[in-house]
Amino acid sequence: MANRQLLDELNERSREVFRKLVEAYLETGEPIGSRTLTRTLTEKVSPATVRNVMQDLEFMGLLSSPHVSAGRVPTQAGLRLFVDGLLEVSDLSDADREMIDSTVQSNTADVTTLLDRVSSALSGLTAGASLVLTPKHDEAPISHIEFVPLGPERALAVIVFSDGHVENRLFQPPPGQTPSSMREAGNFLNAMAEGRTLAELRQAIESQIAQHRQDLDALAQQLIDLGVALWMGEDGTHDRLIVRGRANLISSDERAADLERIKSLFDDLERKRDIAEFLQLAENAEGVRIFIGSENKLFSLSGSALVVSPYMNADRKIVGAVGVIGPTRLNYGRIVPIVNYTAQLVGKLISDRGQG
């Protein structure tokens, strides 16, 4: 939405200068000067006019100057704006189509072998590193699950299924989680996981949360009716129980025991909520995204970009993805149709074979 508004702020001349500059940069990898751009513009203007436009674009954060008196290059924000709003995707060439068809439409019955060939074909066609995410085994029973912290904003869910298949899924953990809380979540889930799929495991935890909520409500309501406590929350939610008059507790061991049980239920409920959130994040872990530069926390240090496209099974469910990793100055116009076409063929093959 922000990019759409920013693009609307550019007049026709600024938009053309920006588009031509990014296209030239993606082709050469070099800073682009005003004289070079002047020769490619539809409107006949002077280099000085183009320089003024480039300065305005630099002020907007879309361009930058690597060196004094040098040309401009697009910033990460500029590349994102270009990809989202100005990228002209070319048609898939006959040569690229034939190469992908010959790779995907092979006679191999082994999906793993097929995806290995797809990976090699994508690397060869795009001169980048390929990425292939295999179909998820969400419908197979879980044997073991573990959460491994990789940093403040990243964690890895290692899921071992009963058929021996192992999946590693990256996700962003809820704020404030520690390695010990992740270990506790894994231990709790493993105690419940036997014979259950991810979806069934999540349902079992949600059922426990609902039961604890009912127990907590019933027990706390007794104290509220007696005037010992009251609910305090936002927007009508029961987030906290406020105890009134500690002297009331001294005369009643039973009430003290009830309050201790309520505290225990609150703590247990909070733990199960955290664990349920972990599981939800692992189940829905992002396998398909498009990242440019630091948007991608995996590859930001190398200034790279990731272009991926999902493939689906016969039920139109995303089961995996194929993609290409390369420098931020990827030839997006050519690579996007290659990746998308490959994903469509892989999905059709997966569906035809009833896998995924």
Image (cartoon, rainbow, N blue to C red):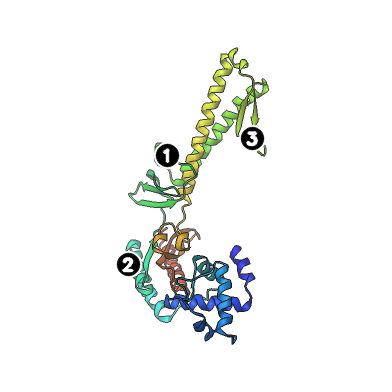
The spot of residue 46 in percent (x, y) is: 57, 85
Quick one: SS at disc 1? Answer: helix
Quick one: SS at disc 2? Answer: loop
Which amino acid, mark 3? Gly
- Give the residue at mark 1: 189
Which amino acid, mark 1? Leu
Q: Is residue 100 above or below residue 236?
A: below
- Give the residue at mark 3: 233
Give neighbour class at mark 3: few <14, some 14-19, many 20+ (Cα, 10 Å): few
Give neighbour class at mark 2: few <14, some 14-19, many 20+ (Cα, 10 Å): few
Residue shown at the point (34%, 49%) measured from the top left: 163
Q: Nearer the viewer, mark 3 or mark 2?
A: 3
Q: Nearer the viewer, mark 3 or mark 1?
A: 3
The spot of residue 71 in percent (x, y) is: 48, 76
Q: Quadrant of the C terminus?
A: bottom left
Earlier sequence position, callout 3 versus callout 1: 1
How much space separates mark 1 and mark 2, taking CA atoms? 38 Å
Task: Compare residues 78 and 101 and report the one nearer the observer.
Answer: 78
Quick one: SS at disc 3? Answer: loop
**Image side of residue 292 versus residue 217, left or right:** left
Earlier sequence position, callout 1 versus callout 2: 2
Residue shown at the point (63%, 66%) measured from the top left: 5
